[in-house]
Image (cartoon, grey):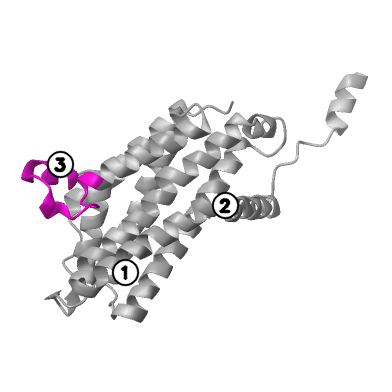
């Protein structure tokens, strides 16, 4: 046995990050998000502001099963706005900044894979989105008497799929954007474009029929529709759920193919 072989046999295997490392990284990512005041306030404040502006009249119009227009239309729209702002706009900006400053490249030389940052950032973003939706729904219940969905299981499934598709689209933005500013610009354009076609500005009834029909099959409009159906107790429309799932899967593949670590 040569000395080189003996040394190799005695050398410990490279350490792999354990659960504590993942938790510490997630905590660090959470602190970064909290320090970004604009990125923290806008996903929480803007949807709640829209909810408050729309709730007075919407809470008086009963549609079905004791659920009002606030429950069936406004809350699903606000939830989708929260998830879209965090998934499509905020998360790509953070990841693009990490690439620009060399954080991802430097992590590649350590036992901590750069992929850990992606997972931690998405996990923190999902928690932020859940908190944002909780704040909005709590305000709706407390001040305007909003009610929970008739089909809670369908609503939770629709929410999970909506979160998945918005964050997958955000990963595509993070993959192709060369700079943090371009990531922010691309994310905003994608978010506002999908939102406009999905009825974020004035509802789908304010859009031309053809445009509204197209918007129903795009991520924002489809997410709002499946949540509305769950809130009304009508189940969830299978074709739109399938479109959301396919979009999430395709976006994840595209992001994985084009993502650059440096």
Give above or below for 53 relative to 90. below
Contact, mark 3 vs mark 1 (Cβ under 8 Å): no
Residue identified by numbered label 3: 214
186 to the left or right of 40: left
Residue identified by numbered label 2: 33
Residue 54 at x, y = what percent? 25, 67
Circle 1: element type? helix
Give the camera-side residue of 95 and 237.
95
Contact, mark 2 vs mark 1 (Cβ under 8 Å): no
Q: Is residue 236 magenta?
A: no
Circle 2: element type? helix
Residue identified by numbered label 1: 52
| Among the 4 quarters of the image, the one containing residue 80 | bottom left
Give the camera-side residue of 79 and 202.
202
Q: Earlier in the sequence, mark 3 or mark 1?
A: 1
Give the camera-side residue of 245 and 98.
98
Q: Earlier in the sequence, mark 3 or mark 2?
A: 2
Nearest-to-viewer mark from 3 and 1: 1
- The magenta-colored residue range is 196-216
Going 57% across and 52% down the picture, which residue do you hit? Answer: 33
Q: Residues within 10 Å of mark 1 (few under 14, many from 20)?
A: some
Give above or below for 122 relative to 172. below
Q: Is residue 209 magenta?
A: yes
Q: Residues within 10 Å of mark 2 (few under 14, many from 20)?
A: many
140 to the left or right of 45: left
The disc placed on residue 211 is: none
Gap between marks 3 and 2, in whole Å? 34 Å
Contact, mark 3 vs mark 2 (Cβ under 8 Å): no
95 to the left or right of 69: right
- The residue positioned farthest toward the front in the image shown: 53
Going 64% across and 55% down the picture, which residue do you hit? Answer: 27
């Amino acid at each position: 046995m040569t000395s080189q072989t003996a040394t190799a046999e005695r050398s410990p295997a490279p350490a792999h990050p354990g659960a504590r490392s993942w938790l510490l990284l997630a905590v660090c990512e959470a602190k970064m998000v909290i320090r970004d005041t604009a990125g923290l306030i806008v996903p929480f404040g803007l949807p709640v502001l829209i909810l408050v502006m729309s709730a007075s009249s919407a809470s008086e119009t009963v549609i079905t099963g004791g659920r009002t227009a606030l429950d069936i239309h406004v809350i699903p729209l606000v939830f989708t706005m929260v998830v879209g702002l965090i998934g499509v706009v905020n998360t790509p900006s953070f990841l693009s900044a990490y690439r620009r400053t060399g954080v991802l490249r430097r992590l590649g030389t350590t036992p901590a894979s750069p992929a850990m940052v992606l997972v931690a950032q998405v996990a923190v973003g999902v928690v932020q989105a859940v908190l944002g939706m909780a704040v909005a729904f709590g305000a709706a219940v407390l001040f305007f008497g909003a009610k929970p969905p008739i089909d809670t299981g369908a609503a939770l499934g629709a929410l999970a799929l909506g979160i998945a598709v918005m964050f997958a689209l955000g990963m595509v933005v993070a993959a192709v954007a060369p700079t943090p500013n371009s990531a922010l610009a691309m994310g905003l354009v994608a978010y506002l474009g999908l939102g406009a076609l999905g009825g974020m500005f004035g509802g789908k009834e304010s859009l031309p029929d053809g445009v509204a029909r197209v918007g129903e099959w795009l991520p924002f409009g489809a997410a709002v529709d499946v949540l509305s159906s769950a809130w009304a107790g009508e189940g969830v429309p299978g074709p739109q759920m399938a479109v959301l799932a396919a979009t999430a899967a395709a976006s994840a593949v595209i992001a994985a193919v084009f993502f650059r670590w440096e």
